[in-house]
Amino acid sequence: MNDALIIGSAAAGQEFHLALENGYHHSWRDCEQFIQWKADPEIREKLEQLQRMNSTLDIMDRRIRQNPGFTQSPGTKSAHEKLKKDYARQSTIFFHTNGPAHYKKVWQQFLYENLDMLWDNKNGVPRVLARELIGLQLFDYVPEMNYMKLGFSRPKGRPQPSFERYVKELNKLGMHKGNKARADVMKFLSTFLFGDELALRFPEDAVVIPTVASRMDLLRRNGLNI
């Protein structure tokens, strides 16, 4: 049913959007903070400032709950209101004005930390989302990544989706072979979403022992004469 819905909607040129369940919103925000911490010192300093403001607000809010008269003095009330407004304004600017490159990194981190959204290791099968994404790639859709939004649109003038092509690609990827197909499926999805076939690789699929020849080639490509 999902395959038919994807193909039918693609044939009509519909846009697609990934909807996150409530539990995943916190995970996405954690991933964004992780990416922010890896950024340059200026950004880290700004993030630390926002965290200090948020901690101060938490302390003040807790005191107000415990003692409603805490903000009765004009000075305290004014300071509390100003801090709330400053934090809301600065955090909105900081977290919502990043560009596509930033959100691409956040989405990669989020999906890497939630690989079970794409593959069911216990039963050795791809999740429905993985099949849907494979279909979108085959039907010439382009991913668009923003703050907590992962959408897909299809340029006009592209050939109509083909159910035959879709089934052939699923077969080619070995979707019926259980966990043996996992590495190839994840490589396909990684390339589609991030242009990097290793972006969403399961750690256990990364065990590769390079030959002496491949090591020598790697050294040469890094500018070392051998």
Image (cartoon, rainbow, N blue to C red):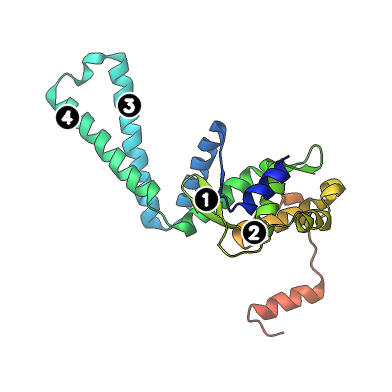
Q: Where is residue 179 in the image (x, y as percent from the top left)?
A: 82, 47
> Which residue does the numbered mark 4 point to in the structure image?
78
Q: Is mark 1 on a helix, strand or loop?
A: helix
Q: Is residue 205 above or below residue 157?
A: above
Distance (Cα) linking label 2 and label 4: 51 Å
> Which residue does the numbered mark 3 point to in the structure image?
59
**Residue 114 sits in which quadrant?**
top right
> Which residue does the numbered mark 1 point to in the structure image?
106
Residue 196, disc:
none
Mark in front: 2 vs 4: 2
Identify the mark nearer the N-term, 2 or 4. Answer: 4
Distance (Cα) linking label 2 and label 1: 16 Å
Q: What element carries label 3?
A: helix
Q: Is residue 50 left or right of residue 158?
A: left
Q: Can residue 207 be seen in this view?
A: no
Q: Where is residue 16 in the image (x, y as percent from the top left)?
A: 57, 48
Under mark 3, the amino acid is Ile
Mark in front: 4 vs 1: 1
Q: Position of residue 226 (x, y in %)?
A: 72, 84
Q: Position of residue 214 (x, y in %)?
A: 77, 74
Q: Is residue 185 visible?
A: yes
